[in-house]
Image (cartoon, helix red, strand yellow):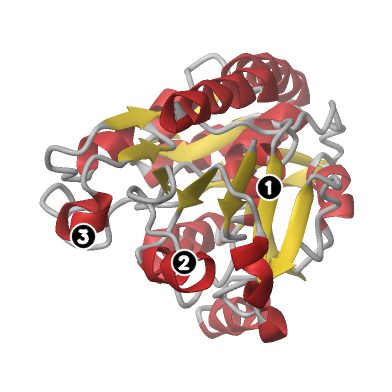
Amino acid sequence: MRVLMWHVHGSWTTAFVQGDHDVVLPLAPGRGPEGRGRAQTWDWPPNAREVPVDRLRDEQLDCVVLQRPEEVDLCERWTGRVPGRDLPAVYLEHNTPRGPAVETQHPVVSDPRLRGVTVVHVTDFNALAWDCGDSPTMVIRHGVPDPGYRYTGRDHSVAVVVNEPVRRWRVAGTDLLLGLASEIPVHVYGMGMQPLLAEARRRDVGLLEVHEDVPQSELHDVLGRHRAYFHPYRWTSLGLSLIEAMMIGLPVLAVAATEAPAAVPPEVGLASSDPRALAAQARRWLDDPIEARSRGLAGREHARATYGLPRFLAEWDLLLKETTR
């Protein structure tokens, strides 16, 4: 099937393009948000094909996977086809609502062109939180390519992955990771690390180390060296970095918000809304590498069974077949 889809969420798209579909990725001048084309930091297979936006009208498309409200207009302008009317469409929602937690209407409700278009949520919590009106909805949980068991746990520290932690302060739980780093060593990986380091120095947080934009090809091995992983987010969809950490074999700590309590059962780690409990568990694993490794192995099996690629790709295949029927 030939699927039009914008490169919005690199990690999610990495999983989707592992399937059998021909994925057409709009390419705009400068690779800006309207069309990033293929990923520059992930090694995507040849079936992920970038097409300049001025050539999209010549593409024979079977359906479109929308991910942002503005893509409805972009699709109509660049392909000459209205999603949901001239071109079968689904709307993939990655995020939790940015407005009132359970009173925000989804964009499909206000756009008459999207009447009847299925909204696909990546977590049960997202589906619960969004007001999608009468639009059909479903959940297809994340799928993650298995990076293999990489855990050594030899570094007496906790790892965190977060982009732009200062700009996304409370949403990302940046205050919580700094609080943890005031007690135990914490290494943070992602983009926008220098503002975080400056904030840590201002607050005299001395156990924090930052690593700016480590290449994806290296990140899994680097993360596996740490004793545990911390997912500090207060309000977000389920971070793929948390799932990857479990697949690598890290025991995990998570703030018990949104989907995290369902993703982290007790045998694989701790999901708690009490920062003191999370810090206590982190110290326990730092002092007990045997327990840390055991929890990590259980987490790997859980993540492979729950978030493996075969289930993810099969569910998307079925949905796209039903959508284009």
Name the residue rendered at 65%, 43% in the picture: 2
Please state the horizontal and vertical placement of residue 242, each as a whole percent of the image: 59, 40
Please state the horizontal and vertical placement of residue 82, each as a whole percent of the image: 37, 59
What amino acid type is highlighted by mark number 3? Asp
Label 2, label 1: how many angstroms apart (C-alpha)?
A: 18 Å
In the rendered structure, the answer to whether residue 215 lies left or right of residue 85 reads: right
Please state the horizontal and vertical placement of residue 178, each as a whole percent of the image: 52, 64
- Dot 2, crowdedness within 10 Å: few (<14), some or many (≥20)? some
Between circles 2 and 1, the one closer to the viewer is: 2
Asked if marks 3 and 1 touch (Cβ < 8 Å), the reply is no
Name the residue rendered at 54%, 33% in the picture: 142
**Rendered image: mark on residue 244:** none
What amino acid type is highlighted by mark number 1? Val
Label located before the other in sequence (2 or 3): 2
Asked if marks 2 and 1 touch (Cβ < 8 Å), the reply is no
Between circles 2 and 3, the one closer to the viewer is: 2
**Residue placed under numbered mark 2 in the picture:** 80
Label 3, label 1: how many angstroms apart (C-alpha)?
A: 25 Å
Viewer-proximal residue, 73 or 171?
Answer: 73
Q: Find numbered disc 3 in the image and state the secondary structure of the residue it sits on.
A: loop
Task: Note whether 322 is above or below 60 in the view shown.
Answer: above
Q: Tell me if I can see residue 232 in this picture.
A: no
Q: Find numbered disc 2 in the image and state the secondary structure of the residue it sits on.
A: loop
In the rendered structure, the answer to whether residue 261 lies left or right of residue 310 reads: left
**Residue placed under numbered mark 1 in the picture:** 23
**Residue placed under numbered mark 3 in the picture:** 111
